[in-house]
Image (cartoon, rainbow, N blue to C red):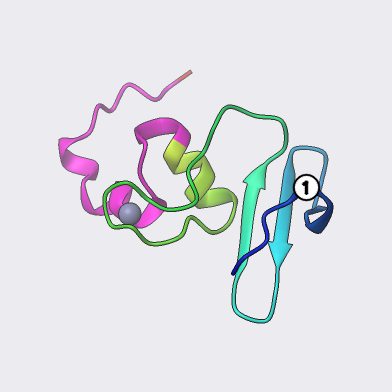
Amino acid sequence: MLDLSKENWKNIDKSVEELENEYIRITRPVNDEYIPIDCPKCNILLNGAEDIQAYKRHQMCNECELINWNTLNHNLNK
Ligand SMILES: [Zn+2]
């Protein structure tokens, strides 16, 4: 059973923290809005800053975002 309690996470930088054990390594934003542990579309674990940023844009992982890019809203220019 994966223990997600706070003390097991270590900070990568001030905005991202990571949890690693012998099976998996997962990252998440620190004190940010709720981000699920896996992609709602493909159910694969979100892993790394790219997946987290893709989730913030389109509520899916980076891989799903690339696959669905043509159907997504392109108004990402800030
Ligand atoms: Zn996905």
In the figure, residue 69 lies in which quadrant? Answer: top left
Q: Is 30 left or right of 47, judged from the image as shown? A: right
Image position, residue 7 (x, y; %): 84, 52
Residue at the far left: name it: 71
SS at circle 1: helix
Q: Image quadrant of residue 26? A: bottom right
| Residue at figure coordinates x 81%, y 46% from the top left | 13
What's the residue at 72%, 56% (across, down)? Answer: 18
Q: Is residue 17 above or below residue 55?
A: below
**Residue 50 appears left or right of 64:** right
Task: Based on the picture, tell me whether residue 41 belongs to the magenta stretch.
Answer: no
| Residue lying at the far top of the rendered structure | 78
Q: Observer-nearest residue: 42 or 63?
A: 42
User: At 48% from the left edge and 55% from the top edge, which residue is drawn?
Assistant: 46
**Depth order, front residue of 3/72:** 3
Q: Amino acid at mark 1?
A: Lys
Magenta stretch? Answer: 56-77
Q: Residues within 10 Å of mark 1 (few under 14, many from 20)?
A: few
**Residue 16: % across, % down:** 72, 45
Instruction: Between residue 40 and residue 47, name the one nearer to us.
Output: 40
The quarter of the rendering in which ligand 1 is drawn is: bottom left
Q: Residue furthest bottom?
A: 22
Q: Position of residue 17 (x, y in %)?
A: 74, 49
Give the residue pinned by disc 1. Answer: 6
Q: Position of residue 49 (x, y in %)?
A: 59, 50
- Left or right of residue 7: residue 27: left
Task: Say whether mark 1 is within 8 Å of ligand 1.
Answer: no
Residue at 28%, 57% (x, y): give it. 42
